Amino acid sequence: MRSQPMLAITSPVRGMLSINGRFAGEIAPQQPFITPVNPSGPAYLVLFPLEAGWLAMARRLAFAEGEFLVKSADEEGVSVVLWPEGVVEVELSPMVAPSRNATEHALDPEGEYVLRRGEHCAVVCPSGKEVLLPSGCGSPELSLGTGVVYLLGPRMEGGMYLAALEPQGALLGFLTADQIEREGEDGFTALVRSGDTVGHARLERWRMDSGGLQMISWESAWASGAPSWPATPEAAALAAVEAAMAGLDSEAAGYLTPALAQSGLLAEIAAECDLCATMKYPPHDGRSCVATIRVVGRNCAKAEPLYFRARQEAGPQGGWRIEAFYRQ
């Protein structure tokens, strides 16, 4: 028996939502609008942002016999996660409204390099050449290297970016990371967080040479300086799958009982998913589970429950061991 499909609609921008031509309610990043929809046929979604600087958007999603049609989410500005029991989580991301009046400000005391913001964000070089920066780049600080101009600034969604330019405007390299720091005249260190439960990260070293911006080495690191070992059964299950997906077999085994570690089951689970996360919309049977998520379309992913049993057992990687993983 198929579940009644339910839409759970949110947006990174606060706005008014209409569904099939009727006002539905207000949505925001942590404020979804949840509603049942027809098991067969289209659902027309319209978002009117309540924050300045964003464009309204409309999208058509479709269902057939209770199943979401993945291809209907292929349009820009839509992200869909299919959760158990018919919950279809939809994020609507409106486009930034083009600015009618471009703004400019100098990046250096002489005013030779100018940041211009209008429909696009660009750096205007002394030669007059414009170097477009990707969307989401904040205002950078300009510094000089050996025949290179560096722009280091924040990203609006978090983290930092580094752009390396030839003085007359050719882009020599572009880098994004959670943190970027200058190291010497033409070197940089970048911290890239994995975003996992325990807090893995990579510390990368980059250097500018004749071939452009090159990574010369990297090493494993902890995002907060030390691991955050799991303190709950759910965190232990998440950490185990994440470690297996990252190829950290020894660490993954440390979250499991010896029998489960020797079974090879965790490696099979890790090979079948693209992400492991908390079950945001869990099944109603109440059993402990996490979500294994795999990409099924251009803008669509599917979450499936991975059930587990855990026992309390103190060890070097926290106080819980997973003794069983199962699907049904």
Image (tube, grey):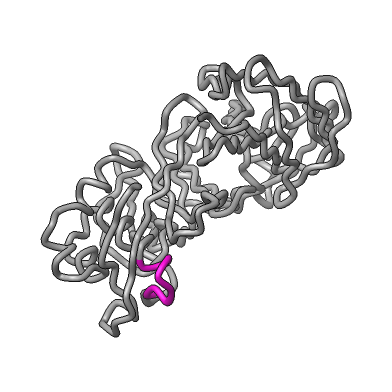
Whether residue 133 can be seen here: no
Residue found at x 75% / y 43%? 105
Q: Is 186 in the magenta?
A: no
**Residue 32 percent coordinates (x, y):** 72, 45
Residue 21's image quarter? top right
Residue 31 appears left or right of 327: right
Q: What residue lies at 52% left-to-right and 31% top-to-bottom?
A: 169
| Residue 106 occupies quadrant | top right
Please provide percent x and percent y for residue 254. 22, 71
Q: Is residue 240 above or below residue 11?
A: below
Question: Does residue 130 appear in this view?
Answer: yes
The image shows a total of numbered marks equal to 0
Residue found farthest to the left = 262
The residue lying toward the viewer, choosing from 60 and 212, is 60
The residue range painted magenta reads: 229-236
Picture quadrant where residue 211 is located: top left
Nearer to me, 143 or 220: 220
Q: Residue furthest bottom?
A: 314
Picture layout, residue 134 above or below residue 106? above
Return the residue found at the far front.
1
227 above or below 244? below
Q: Position of residue 266 (x, y in %)?
A: 23, 54
Identify whether 191 is placed above or below 72.
below
Horizontal arrangement in the rendering, residue 78 relative to residue 242 (left or right): right
Closest to the observer: 41 or 217?
41
Residue at figure coordinates x 25%, y 67% from the top left:
323
Point 29% across, 67% down: residue: 322
